[in-house]
Amino acid sequence: MRLFEGTPFDRPPKCERCDRLVENCECPPAVAPEILPEKQRLRVGVEKRKKGKIVTVIRDLAAGNQHAELLTALKSSCGAGGNLQNETTIEIQGDHADRIKQLLQDRGFKLKK
Ligand SMILES: [Zn+2]
């Protein structure tokens, strides 16, 4: 029930983009703009996992950004497997800290010391 529904003050909600009533709107869902690399300050660290497995972990990526393309670039640059741990963390198999830091900086990311 909207405020003033059924009264002369009632204004059905309209889409700001197409100006149609929201119930008739066919606009694609709004996509939040991605946070630019230079606005992000990443942590890159080498960590040891179970059975002595070494991984390079990139943390503090912007939540909400798409990281699939970055993950692919990192894997191909390192010639190693890897995956997205969560919205903000990428893990690459092996110790590739130097290469990964360089790649991230080349893309404009800032790194935490
Ligand atoms: Zn619309």
Image: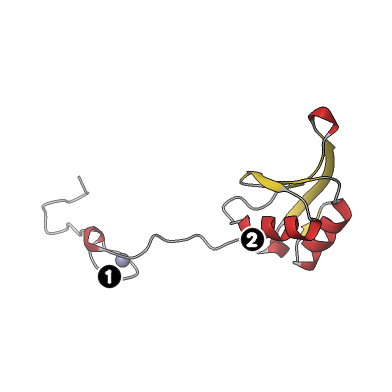
How packed mark 2 is, by other alpha carbons closer than 10 Å (few <14, some 14-19, many 20 or more), is: few
Residue at horizontal 59 percent and vertical 56 percent from the top: 65
Give the answer, above or below, for where 63 lies relative to 21: above
Where's residue 67, x and y in %?
A: 63, 55
Q: What is the quadrant of residue 38 in the picture?
A: bottom right
Q: What is the quadrant of residue 57 in the picture?
A: top right
Q: Amino acid at mark 1?
A: Asp
Determine whether the beta carbon of the residue marked 1 sits less than 8 angstroms from the nearest atom of ligand 1.
Answer: yes
Residue 14 relative to residue 53: left or right: left
Comes first in the chain, label 2 or label 1: 1
Q: Which residue is mark 2?
A: 69
Residue at horizontal 76 percent and vertical 52 percent from the top: 42
Q: Which residue is mark 1?
A: 19
Instruction: Specify the quarter for ligand 1.
Output: bottom left
Residue at horizontal 86 percent and vertical 46 percent from the top: 95
Separation of marks 2 and 1 at Cα, in angstroms: 35 Å
Where's residue 6, x and y in %?
A: 11, 52
Residue 19 relative to residue 65: left or right: left
Query: Which is closer to the viewer, label 2 or label 1?
Result: 2
Question: Element type at marker 2?
Answer: helix
Residue 72 relative to residue 101: left or right: left
User: For this rendering, which residue is in front, 74 or 3?
Assistant: 74
Give the answer, above or below, for where 50 lies relative to 65: above
